[in-house]
Image: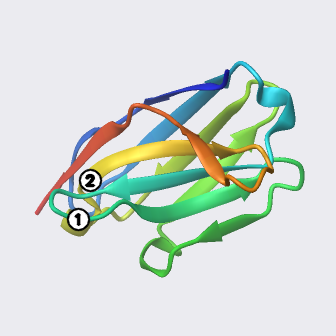
Amino acid sequence: QVQLVESGGGLAQAGGSLRLSCAASGGTYNINQVGWFRQAPGKKREFVARITWSSGSTYYTDSVKGRFTISRDNAKNTVALQMNSLKPEDTAVYYCSIDLGTDRGFEYWGQGTQVTVSS
């Protein structure tokens, strides 16, 4: 059973930076891709970024391009999300998720970590 633990959330000022980390354990030998998602109060969970485990290819939602960077450490089974030039609209609970290459897509989720950006 895959388990994911996020860390690194907190409070930042607009224009500041935070770095989130996601540690995966259990059944990680079959990871296809890892993604970060976020959910703001009263809104649906939305995709932020993803990275392909084998190739390192990345993809971002338009609103974070040029500001966020997703990276992976295959040896440590961790994925990071470096968030720069933060905006108040980035405030949300951030979740990492794993896709094991099945038709279920992103099916394993962490507990989430709160990111709050003040103006």
Residue at 28% of width from left, 63% of height from top? 15
At label 1, which amino acid type do we have? Answer: Lys
Could you say whether the residue bearing mark 2 is in a helix, strand or loop?
A: strand
> What x and y, as percent, mark residue 84?
42, 59
| Residue with the mark numbered 1 | 43
Q: Is residue 61 left or right of residue 114?
A: right
Return the residue nearer the eye: 116 or 108.
Answer: 108
Task: Tell me residue 53's x, y (percent).
Answer: 81, 47
Residue at the disc numbered 2: 92
Residue for point 79% across, 63% down:
57
What amino acid does circle 2 point to?
Ala
Residue placed furthest toward the left: 119
Q: Quadrant of residue 49?
A: bottom right
Q: Which residue is depicted at the point 62% across and 50% down?
A: 106
Towards the viewer: 51 or 13: 51
In the image, what residue occupies the spot 76% across and 43% down? 100
Q: Is residue 111 above or below residue 12?
A: above
Q: Position of residue 114 (x, y in %)?
A: 27, 40
The residues bearing labels 1 and 2 have C-alpha atoms spaced at a distance of: 9 Å
Identify the disc placed on residue 54. none
Along the line of sight, the residue nearer the viewer: 91 or 38: 38
Where residue 13 sits, quadrant-wise, is bottom left
**Mark before the other along the chain sequence, 1 or 2:** 1
Contact between labelled residues 2 and 1, with CB atoms less than 8 Å apart: yes
Looking at the rendered image, the disc whose residue lies closer to the viewer, 1 or 2, is: 1
Q: Can you tell which quarter of the image residue 2 is in?
A: top right
Instruction: Describe the element under mark 1 as helix, strand or loop.
Output: loop
Image height of 40 relative to 98, above or below: below
Specify the quadrant that holds the N terminus: top right
Mark 1 neighbour class, 10 Å CA radius: few under 14, some 14 to 19, many 20 or more: few
Q: 10 Å neighbourhood of mark 2: few (<14), some, or many (≥20)?
A: many
Would you say 117 lies left or right of 29 here?
Answer: left
